[in-house]
Image: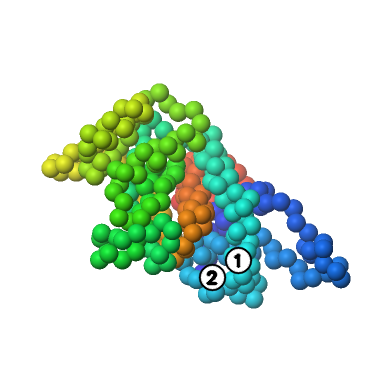
Amino acid sequence: MRVLPSWLAEPLWDQFAALLPVRPGYHPDHPLGCHRRRISGRVVFGTVLQLLRFGCSYEATADTTCSATTIRSRRYEWVRLDVFAEFKRIALESYDRIVGLVLDRIAVDGAITKAPGCGEAAGRSPVDRGKQGLKRSGMTGGYGIPLGRVLAGANRHDSRLLAPTLDLLDDLGPLPDDITVHLDVGYDSDRTRALLAERGLHGRLAHKGEKAPIQAGQRWHVERTHAWQNAFQRLARCHERRTTVINVFFDLADTVITVRSLIRRAWTTHRWDERPHRRL
């Protein structure tokens, strides 16, 4: 089964490969001058995409072309090089340059998913009979482009994660003078309003006791992005234990979402050789 269509997978790999250092096919320190040839980065990258999309184990994904040990070791190698974070940053910069990020209105919301791996960021889930769960406080731009997230246990309240989530705005470079933050009823408190006022942000909050559709505003963008992220089974049911590795898969998923949205929105305004034949 194909993980991603070629019009999306090939551009992703071309940019990812440009971030990797040049490595010889054989290890130069081998005493006999030869050894088992190094597995191609393209093969490992495709395998990591399979892990992200289908959520299966490393052993189930491995085959004769790439073992589970190779997947893990190459993943840690790329983590040390900070490739995935740079990959996501380039995708955001490309989207901002070609289409434009809408940063004058952002949305923040939390989402709880299962975490049977009981990792560093897991906690008792209040919506799943106390089983281990993972909460992500996600932030998106005006059209749902993921800007970042903060991971915590499922028992952490959304409002407690608002401050570290808004801190991610500092990594986006110059920001508009007036920014409106759209929040749901879980953030309706004087503490939240004071936090937004300290940062010079305007808040549009749903009020407790009033029907949400009346004041939904632009909050649906972040809810849709949570659904996009949950389509990657690795994120919907997290078996990883280390927060660093969980963020790697989130960075990769956010990059796929950003590039897919970029191609879709640029389809009517730009032309390129590998442009899909129809709008997606």
Q: Secondary structure at mark 1?
A: helix
Does residue 257 appear in the picture of this structure?
Answer: yes
Q: Which residue is mark 2?
A: 58
- Residue 171 is situated, as x and y percent measured from the top left of the image, at 50, 36
Amino acid at circle 2: Tyr
Image height of 244 relative to 30, above or below: above
Locate residue 55, reporting x and y percent.
46, 66
Q: Position of residue 247 (x, y in %)?
A: 49, 53
Residue drawn 50% across and 71% down?
Answer: 57
Q: Amino acid at mark 1?
A: Ile
Label 2 near label 1: C-beta < 8 Å?
yes
Query: Which residue is found at the position 74% from the left and 53% from the top?
Result: 22
Q: Which mark is residue 115?
A: none
Q: Position of residue 113 (x, y in %)?
A: 35, 59
Q: Residues within 10 Å of mark 2 (few under 14, many from 20)?
A: some
The image shows residue 160, relative to residue 195, as above or below, that is below
Residue plotted at (41% across, 56% down)? 121
Classify mark 2: helix, strand or loop.
Answer: helix
**Which residue, as the protein is rendered here, is positioned at the far left?**
209
Residue 265 position (above or below residue 34): above
Q: Going 29% across and 49% down the picture, which residue do you hit? A: 157
Q: How many marks do you count on the picture?
A: 2
Q: Earlier in the sequence, mark 1 or mark 2?
A: 2
Real-space Cα separation, disc 1 to disc 2, in angstroms: 7 Å
Residue carrying label 1: 71
